[in-house]
Structures are given as C-alpha cells and as structure tokens.
Image (cartoon, helix red, strand yellow):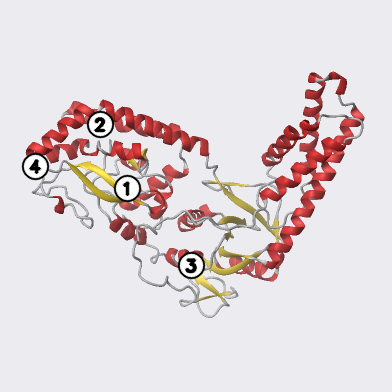
Amino acid sequence: MTMDSAPARHTGQGGTGPAGGSAFAPAPHATARRSATAIHPPRGPRTDQARSAVRQHRVRRRGRVFPLLTADALAAVLAVTTLPGAGLPALTAVPVAGLLAALHAQAGLYRPRLAPSALLELPAVAGRSAVLWCGTAAVVAAVEPARALGWSALLTAVCLQVLLACAGRGFVNQLQRRSAVRRPASALVVGPGAGASAVAAALHGRPEFGLRPVGLADTAAAADGDTGVLPFLATHEDIRRAVIQNSVTHAVFTRPPEADERTASLVRLFHDHGCRLWLADPAGTAKITGMRVAHPADQLWGYAVQPLLPRPARPVERWAKRGIDSLLALVALIAAAPVMGLCALAVRLWDGPGVIFRQERVGLYGRPFTLLKFRTLRADEHESATRWTVAGDRGMSPVGSFLRKSSLDELPQLWNVVRGDMSLVGPRPERPFFVAKFSTVHPGYEARHRMPVGITGLAQINGLRGDTSIEDRARFDNHYIDTWSLWQDLWILARTAAFFFRFRLGGS
C-alpha cells in the first residue's frame, strides 16, 4: 500500500519556483526585449487552481499525416490497377496500400517537417517501393503462379509506384506550404542570447516555414535593455501564459533541452499543452534524454532542424495498465474484505460513527475526485483541506495511529482504482490547495498529473514519504512517467508489498 501516510515537508531542498531562476545576459545584438506587459495575466480570478494545474489541450494543428497517407494510398491503388500486363486482382491494392503506409512510417516519412521536399524523400520512397513490390511479387508467385510478375513487370511497378508517390507528396507539400503562409502557427523560440534571436528572425522573415514567433523563452537568462520587439519570457509562469494566450502550437529549441534542467522542464510544459517541438541547432545535436530525434534532413533557413518527438505513448500498454489495475484491485478488494471489515469495526468501536473518510484530491489532468480512506481521527474537521499533516494529532486514537503506520487506512482506495479515479501505481494525489501551492514553487510539480495518480509510486518506494522534499518527489514522479512501462509498475508493486510485509513481520 502507500508509504506516504506520514507528514511530508512541502518545501523543496534547494528548489526554485517559476519566478526564482538564475540569470545571465544575452548577447547585445539579440532581437528581443523584456516586456512585463507583453504577456497579460488571465482575466478574472482563478476559481479552480487545481483543475487548471494540468489539462490535456487538444491543439488545432495543420494535419499533414492524413493528406500524405491519402496520397500514398492513391499511388498504391493506381500502381496496382494500371500496371501493364500484370492482371493483379483489384483487392490486392488494399494490402499493398497498407504495407506502403507502414514502410513509409518506419522510414519517418510521416514525421513533421518545416521544409518538406518530395525530391529529398525520393531515395527513401524508392527503397520502400522496391521492398514492397518484391514482397508483393513473392506472395503472388506463391499464391497464384499463373500471375507471377516478371522482372520487367516488377521494375515497371517500382518505377510507377515511385513516380506516383512522389507526385502525390509534392502536390500535398505545395498545398500545405501555401496554407502555412496564409495561416502561420504561433511559436516560441527557446534558448539563450543571439542564437534564439537569429532563429526568431529567420522565422519572421521566411513565412514559408509557417511559424510566427511570438516570444523568446529562456528560464536561465534575463534580457537587459531595449533589444528588440519580441517579449522575453524568463519564468515558467510567463511562458505558460504566453502558450495559452497566444495559442502557441510550436516551440523551437536552439540547444538540446537536456542542456539545462530548467529548459528540460519546459519540454513537459509544452508537451502538456500539445505543442510540437523542434530543435534548430547549427552546431549539431547530442542525444536527448527522454526524447528521440528524427533523422531525415530538414532545415530552417540554413539551420539544421529536427522534430523532437516524445517517446511513443504506447496506448495498448496503457489500456493493459488500466485492465491490470481493475483486475488486481478487484481481487485485492475481495481478498482484503476480512481485514477491511476488522478495520471498519475497530474504527467504529473506538472512534465512533463515520468509518470512511472522504476528501477531494486532484487526479489525471487536474480533474478532482473523491479519495476514500478509513477515518483515523475522532473528528473529521481536524483533517481540513488546507492542513498539511495530521500526524501526531492528539485526536488520533491508537487504532487510527496503527492504521496510518501500517497503511491499512489506504485500503478503501482500491475502490477508487476499480472506479478509474486512480491507478495502483502512479504519483500520489494531493489536495487542490496544495497542488496550486506546489505548482507555483516547483516547476515540475504540475507535470505529475500527466499520468493517473496511484496508491503507491516510485517516489514512495525510494523512501520519499514522511518529512521529505516535495521537489524530490516531483522529480521521481516525472521520471516514472517519462520511463513508464508495465514491468516498472510490477516492480514497484513488488517493492511496495515487500515493505508492507516487512512492517507486518517486524511488528513495528
């Protein structure tokens, strides 16, 4: 069960909030200026800070994948139906189109591009077309030898496929280039000094890339004097406001995000708001922690540029996580029913009516839910929504103290897991008041809500419970999310069970 039922210190050790970053001055010729009035605070009071801590923003982007898929599918269908002398069945076009899309996806031909070019993609298209038609010819020869493709027909099919695919992709690229010029997307340039200013100037002067810079962001720097027309954003709060108020959909980094801890935390901020990330680094790129760099060449007015792609979301594994959570929680509820009955009886006899304690907590994407626990205090009002800890409270009975130390008071949360409010493994949920408070102090705290909250987690099995740093907990929680896997969940559950049984056998 959870291991954070003891009090926790809510001041990070050496942590800095969004407004407390260190600074260094950019180059004198930077084209940005500090503007305190450029990014305005949201109108009206924030009535629900916790709910707005992290939301899943669905950003309207210019769809590029579907038109390219359509062009590739049409090329495959036309190649099959018009191949001279082959006489392939019309239904052959369906698997051929599907295989072509899979091969192109494997080659990264559907990844985002700032300057797409069908001619630059020609070698990759030609290679995949050759693989596709060689495989198709082998299957046709095995199934219907009378329709086997000869060498001349095979070469014709490959050439026809390449010609049609490149023509379709070139047409799609031209349409999207015109659309990008007419309706450019808002972008933030992230990086220090003259490098960021130069990239912003390139975007501003070349509308064909489809990005309109609205600000320069660098949490590790500060602008001095009048250096241009774009607002300079030096805190996480300013950057977050800029993203929301300017409908920012792209962020262009001028150095690898891992180069600085504050810059790395911006990756989570942009990702949570649905932004597409780019790296424009003329000096070359290093391996980026938590990200993967797409290799097909692209450029931004002479700067080498790569899309920064998050690790795959692995939806099948996430569905499996939800199924395993529900199954294990249901089994655990049935197995623990006698223990829960004894706990409920002890609370009722010792502390009076009201066995179950209910409290609002913040879950996935900042959505509130009602968390269930066994009551461990004689009076519920002692456990208010804005009181950090109740450990050592004189109103806590011996039964309540035992339930807390053994984590048995958390057993009703298995029902939260069955309902889908929580997971067995994930960041521990907190009350709305403290979520809003910690989010303003620790830049990575609000990013914890990208994953369903859990009964136990990576921070808890590493001893980050009780009187420990919230900054450390947030770092462990974000590391768990960035490196999540089903095996890691099972490992955390095993470690949690080992802790629980050590407590029971040790009698502490």
Pointers 4 and 2 in contact (C-beta within 8 Å)? no
Query: Quick one: SS at disc 3?
Result: loop
Q: Which residue is mark 4?
A: 352
Q: Which residue is mark 3?
A: 221
Is the N terminus in the top left, top right, bottom left or bottom right quadrant? top left
Q: Nearer the viewer, mark 4 or mark 2?
A: 4
Q: Earlier in the sequence, mark 2 or mark 3?
A: 3
Residue sitting at 51 percent across and 52 percent down?
A: 258
Residue density around tag 2, few if under 14, some if 14–19, many if 20 or more, within 10 Å: some
Q: Nearer the viewer, mark 4 or mark 3?
A: 4
Residue kind at label 2, given as amino acid type: Phe
For the question of whether residue 301 can be seen, the reply is no
Q: CA distance from mark 4 to mark 2?
A: 27 Å
Image coordinates of residue 484 in percent, x first then y, are 45, 39
Q: CA distance from mark 3 to mark 1?
A: 33 Å
Q: Earlier in the sequence, mark 1 or mark 4?
A: 4
Tell me if 462 is positioned left or right of 242 in this view.
left
Quadrant in the rendering for residue 130 = top right
Q: Which mark is residue 429?
A: 1
Q: Is 371 above or below relative to 238? A: above
Q: Earlier in the sequence, mark 4 or mark 2?
A: 4
Residue kind at label 4, given as amino acid type: Gly
Residue kind at label 3, given as amino acid type: Ala
Tell me if 243 is positioned left or right of 286 in this view.
left
Image coordinates of residue 213 in percent, x first then y, are 60, 68
Q: Nearer the viewer, mark 1 or mark 2?
A: 1
Query: Quick one: SS at disc 2?
Result: helix
Tell me if 153 is positioned left or right of 282 in this view.
right
Q: CA distance from mark 2 to mark 3?
A: 46 Å
Q: CA distance from mark 1 to mark 2?
A: 20 Å
Query: Quick one: SS at disc 1?
Result: loop
Q: Which residue is mark 2?
A: 500
